[in-house]
Structure formats: C-alpha cells, structure tokens
Amino acid sequence: MKCLIVYRSHHRMNTQRVARAMAGAAGATLMAVDECRPEDLDGYDLVGFGSGIYGGRHHRDLLALVDGMPQKERKVFVFSTSAGLKVEHHRALREALAGKGCRITGEFRCRGEYRLLRLIPVSRGHPDEKDLADARTFARGLSTP
Ligand SMILES: Cc1cc2nc3c(=O)[nH]c(=O)nc-3n(C[C@H](O)[C@H](O)[C@H](O)COP(=O)(O)O)c2cc1C
C-alpha cells in the first residue's frame, strides 16, 4: 500500500511529531502541505491529512489543498492535535474531502500542548509517548480493503 501523509504544523510542531510517528509505522511518505500540490496525491492508495486545530478547524492551508483537488475517488484519513478534543474539529476537513469524492477510512486525534498568550500551557506535555504510541498503532491498522 502506498501511503502519503500531508500535514501542517506550526504552533509547537505537535502535529509534525504525530505525522512522523505515523509515517514511520506505516512506511508512508511524509509531505508538508506547503510542498504539496494536488497532483502530488495521485499514485497513492491512501492519503492522510492532518494539522493542529486552529479556531475549531484544521489549518487553512490544508483546507485550501483539498479545495484545489479535482473530484476523484480516493481513500483518505484525517488526523489532528488540539488543546481540547472535540469531534467537531474534523468536520470542515471531513466535509471538504467528502465533497471531492474521498472516502474517509479513519480518524485520529490527540492532545497537543497550546501556550495561551505564549506562556500558560494547556494540555501540557502532549503529544506524549502514549499519544505517539497510539498514533503508531492507528497507522499500522490502516489498510486498503
Ligand atoms: C491560533 C491558535 C488557535 C487554536 N485554536 C484551537 C481550538 O480552537 N481548539 C483547540 O482545541 N485547540 C486550539 N489550539 C491549540 C492547537 O490546536 C494545539 O496546540 C495543536 O497541537 C497545535 O499543533 P501544531 O503544534 O502542530 O501547530 C489553537 C492554537 C493556536 C496557536
């Protein structure tokens, strides 16, 4: 199975750590979203999209990439790190992917430390070793039925 993981991470590089753990476990290619054009997704059996959550949704660059994708049946998965865990965080990206004909085969989320006013830690220490182990387990379970 050829798997690509596209991610955007900038606040504390939390999502990059999760993306790297997943890529290592699944033997996936890793690409930062700013290096990725819609045509780069072709040729993969499965594409993962992940970022931190900012203002209740994935990073706008990730949503813009999906916006620029042509209609095509694709298997995809979605992941995120965020200070608090909410199901709604994935809604905008999920809907955007579904609108492009993608089938979402899995979702992963874990906490990611946030520094309020650059000082006060929320969800301190996340993603921790358990979060990264969970991310690896999730990635190993990805398949293309
Ligand atoms: C501008 C900004 C907005 C954020 N908004 C949310 C939010 O709406 N909900 C939430 O749970 N976390 C929010 N967070 C916390 C981040 O989602 C969390 O720290 C995440 O792990 C950052 O990922 P990154 O280090 O890969 O960029 C926000 C962080 C920033 C910097």
Image (tube, rainbow, N blue to C red):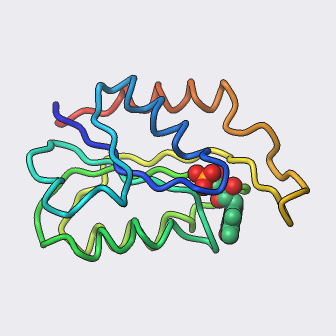
Quarter the C terminus occupies: top left
* Residue lying at 57% horizontally and 57% vertically, measured from the top left: 52
Q: Residue furthest front?
A: 35
* Residue lying at 58% horizontally and 56% vertically, measured from the top left: 10
Q: Is residue 12 left or right of residue 16?
A: right
The relative height of residue 59 versus residue 21 in the rendered view (above or below) is below
* Residue lying at 28% horizontally and 36% vertically, measured from the top left: 29
x then y, percent, for residue 25: 39, 23
Q: Residue furthest right?
A: 120
Pick the residue in front: 124 or 31.
31
Quarter the N terminus occupies: top left
Instruction: Tell me if residue 82 can be seen.
Output: no
Instruction: Tell me if residue 20 can be seen.
Output: yes
Answer with the quadrant where ligand 1 appears in the image. Answer: bottom right
* Residue lying at 36% horizontally and 60% vertically, measured from the top left: 34
x then y, percent, for residue 2: 17, 34
